Image (cartoon, rainbow, N blue to C red):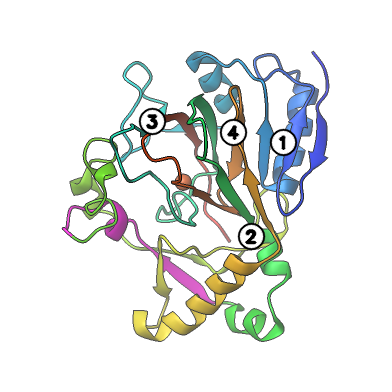
Amino acid sequence: MSLPTVTSLSGVGAEISGVDLRDLSDEAFGEITQAFSEHGVLFFRNQTLSEQDHIEFAQRWGDININRFFAAHPDYAEIALVAKEPDQTDNIGGGWHTDHSYDLEPALGSVLVARELPETGGDTMFASMYAAYDTLPDDLREQVQGLRAVHSGRHIFGAADDTYYSKSDAGRGRIGNATVADQLLDVTHPVVITHPMSGKKALYVNPAFTTHFEGQTREDSQPLLSRLFAHCFSGDFHYRFKWSPGSVAMWDNRSTWHWALNDYQGQRRIMHRITIEGCALN
Ligand SMILES: [Fe+2]
């Protein structure tokens, strides 16, 4: 067993080397936890995790969330499949978002393991919501002070003809349970959260699930939401991760956004995702 080397990346995240995730001492795990809290997304290369190893690593962080909408691994309910076959066009997560913000207690984060990669393409983008907050222009910072936003998963996972996944071929077998999604209630979270691990402030709205501000109509919310998103799209706090066999990424849903690029048509990409339960955000 050895201790991790943490290398900060430009934009957001850190690469962790010198460790085998199957065999982490408490001390090494503590250093990884610290790096996660600080950097928001961690990348590990050349790992050899079996499905059971993947589950055991995730369990060190907390309880596993059994995903309601993603197809599960046939043998391991804890593992959600993020898959795309050569004859499928649309991918899962193909736009900037953070997972589970539509839950009252949003997930802490996810551990994604590469199982089968396209020869070209299929990178994942990450963005730091710590940096998004820290670099907000003063007028925006004033406007979001004390504001809460409403988040919903119904327009993404729901059964209506015009939801995100109804219009996508990912909605045919890879993403399901639309009638459960239709029962999701709107939830609200502060637009600026204090991260439960780091104590740092992070901007907590995202283009997929945030629909409007509490106490405002969707129409009235749009100008400020658009400005916040534009700030996040254009910021100097992005990192593009190129997967290789054995790569593992672990991201924090509270302090990062991610976006799975869909630039590998005609090729297969199979990833295994385990999501860890989080807590209410303040
Ligand atoms: Fe995602």
| Contact, mark 4 vs mark 3 (Cβ under 8 Å) | no
The residue shown at (55%, 69%) is 191
Q: Which element carries disc 3, helix, strand or loop?
A: strand
Magenta residue check for 58: no
Name the residue type under label 4. Answer: Trp
Q: Earlier in the sequence, mark 4 or mark 2?
A: 2
Residue at mark 2: 129
Callout 3 crowding tier (Cα within 10 Å): few <14, some 14–19, many ≥20: many
Image disc number at residue 81: 3
Give the extent of the magenta segment.
Answer: 147-161
Q: Nearer the viewer, residue 38 or 127?
A: 127
Q: Nearer the viewer, residue 149 or 130?
A: 130
Q: Earlier in the sequence, mark 1 or mark 4?
A: 1
Picture layout, residue 107 above or below residue 46? below
Real-space CA distance between mark 1 and mark 3, rounded to the nearest whole angstrom: 25 Å
Image disc number at residue 243: 4
Name the residue type under label 1. Answer: Thr
Callout 2 crowding tier (Cα within 10 Å): few <14, some 14–19, many ≥20: many
Magenta residue check for 154: yes
Callout 1 crowding tier (Cα within 10 Å): few <14, some 14–19, many ≥20: some
